[in-house]
Image (tube, grey):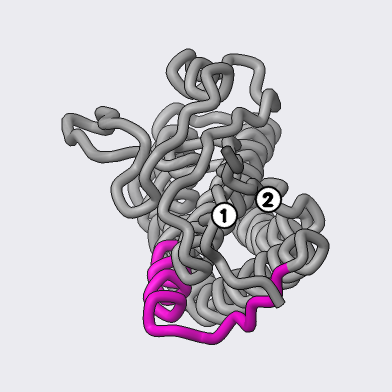
């Protein structure tokens, strides 16, 4: 009896992830340099009265909110371009890799830009735009809090500078996570659409073995060579009180991938 053919899995591309992160880092670095300059300059100017007069707190709050409006605008403008660039690059890379794997296996498939492909790319772009725009919003909320606490307690400029640097590190790590997680999700979702367009109905779960603390259910699925339905998902998994069918690469920080099972009746090239 003939066994169904499987293709190699498509892993998230580390080069695309690195390029995505560099673009985010550049924006964050520029933002941090700007706010550090203006906040420290204003803080120094008001240091003698900082703990005794209400006006320095008002000055600092107005400055921070002015800076926030400026950087919200810059991130909003950059978010759509970056999300479009990344989503298109992931789709092109997935199509290229799948075409190569299929050709090596003796098949010829002409991938077209279908309605389903457009849906998944637009959804990917929308999610990334929201995440990118959330970076300055979250950053400045924390910055305003630490500056107001510094004003209230009469902290010196070195303390404030150190706290600004710590917050910068937190935001950079969040950007790193966004780049990695979005690379995993975008690749997994686009791969799934292309698998369906090839006529595949099933795929096998494959663990990446890349994380320090793997999810036991994901590792077990890989070890047992779990075959799942592409239209449905592998199993029900809880997420924030909501249960839904799970796919490889979909859960937060999941690096698992799928191995498509090629139907026996698929025509070759």
Magenta span of residues:
107-127
Q: Which mark is residue 262?
A: 1
Disc 1 secondary structure class: strand
Residue placed most toward the observer, 143 or 250: 250
Q: Quadrant of the C terminus?
A: bottom right
Q: Position of residue 16 (x, y in %)?
A: 74, 60
Q: How far across and down, in percent of the image, does residue 58 sit? A: 36, 56
Task: Tell me if label 1 and label 2 are in contact, CB under 8 Å.
Answer: yes
Which quarter of the picture shows residue 32? bottom right
Does residue 156 appear in this view?
A: no
Q: Position of residue 73 (x, y in %)?
A: 48, 78
Q: How many discs appear?
A: 2
Towards the viewer: 207 or 239: 207
| Residue, disc 2 | 7
Whether residue 63 is situated above or below residue 89 in the rendered picture: above
Residue 264 position (above or below residue 11): below
| Residue displayed at 54% across by 25% down | 225
By secondary structure, the bulk of the magenta-drawn segment is best described as helix
| Residue 116 lies in the magenta-colored region | yes
């Amino acid at each position: 009896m003939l066994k169904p053919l499987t293709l190699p899995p498509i892993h998230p591309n580390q080069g695309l992830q690195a390029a995505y992160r560099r673009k985010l880092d550049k924006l964050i670095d520029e933002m941090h340099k700007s706010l550090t300059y203006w906040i420290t300059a204003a803080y120094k100017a008001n240091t003698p009265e900082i703990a005794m007069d209400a006006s320095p707190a008002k000055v600092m709050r107005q400055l921070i909110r002015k800076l926030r409006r400026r950087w919200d605008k810059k991130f909003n403008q950059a978010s759509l371009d970056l999300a479009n660039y990344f989503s298109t690059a992931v789709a092109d890379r997935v199509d290229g890799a799948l075409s190569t794997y299929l050709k090596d296996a003796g098949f010829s498939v002409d991938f077209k830009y279908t309605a389903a492909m457009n849906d998944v790319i637009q959804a990917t772009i929308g999610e990334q735009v929201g995440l990118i725009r959330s970076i300055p919003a979250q950053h400045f909320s924390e910055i305003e809090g630490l500056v107001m606490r510094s004003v209230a307690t009469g902290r010196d400029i070195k303390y404030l500078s150190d706290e600004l640097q710590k917050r910068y590190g937190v935001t950079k790590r969040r950007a790193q996570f966004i780049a990695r997680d979005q690379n995993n999700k975008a690749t997994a979702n686009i791969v799934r659409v292309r698998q369906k367009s090839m006529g595949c109905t099933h795929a096998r779960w494959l663990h990446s073995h890349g994380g320090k603390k793997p999810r036991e259910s994901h590792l077990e699925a890989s070890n047992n060579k779990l075959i799942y339905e592409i239209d449905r998902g592998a199993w029900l998994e809880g997420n924030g009180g909501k249960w839904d069918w799970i796919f490889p690469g979909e859960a937060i920080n999941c690096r698992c991938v799928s191995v498509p099972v090629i139907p026996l009746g698929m025509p070759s090239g």
